[in-house]
Amino acid sequence: MNETNANEAQQVEKIWKALAKYGIHTEAELKEAVKKMKPLNIGCMVSVRNGSEAAV
């Protein structure tokens, strides 16, 4: 396994550990949890800032 794959595997492991804290242990449980989520307003992250089309 090369370094990139090892880092990705470590990241995936960390994500699953974090999800386990919320009772999510399988992909099916994750999909169900996402379905049950309330809508997330991300407007503040995608809105035009100060009348400029390009955010810096």
Image (tube, rainbow, N blue to C red):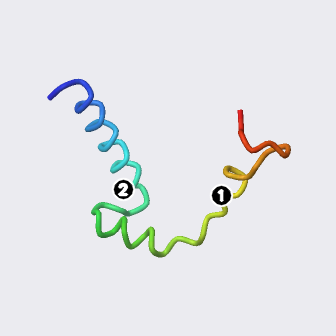
Asked where in the image residue 41 lies, by quadrant, the reply is bottom right
Q: 10 Å neighbourhood of mark 2: few (<14), some, or many (≥20)? A: few
Of 39 and 26, which appears nearest the observer?
A: 39
Of 41 and 25, which appears nearest the observer?
A: 41
Q: 10 Å neighbourhood of mark 1: few (<14), some, or many (≥20)? A: few
The quadrant in which the C terminus is found is: top right
Which of pointers 1 and 2 indicates the residue nearer the eye?
A: 1
Q: Is residue 45 left or right of residue 31?
A: right
Residue 20, label in figure: 2
Residue in the image at 29% along x and 36% along y? 8
Residue in the image at 39% along x and 55% along y? 19
Q: Secondary structure at mark 1?
A: loop
Above or below, comparing residue 51 to residue 7 in the picture: below
Q: CA distance from mark 1 to mark 2?
A: 25 Å
Above or below, comparing residue 2 to residue 16 in the picture: above
Residue in the image at 41% along x and 49% along y? 18
Residue in the image at 48% along x and 75% along y? 36
Above or below, comparing residue 54 to residue 31 in the picture: above
- Residue at the outermost left position: 1
Residue 7's x, y, as percent?
A: 29, 31
The residue to which callout 1 is attached is 42
Q: Secondary structure at mark 2?
A: helix
Residue type of the residue flagged with mark 1: Ile
Above or below, comparing residue 50 to residue 21 in the picture: above
Residue 4's x, y, as percent?
A: 27, 28
Residue type of the residue flagged with mark 2: Ala
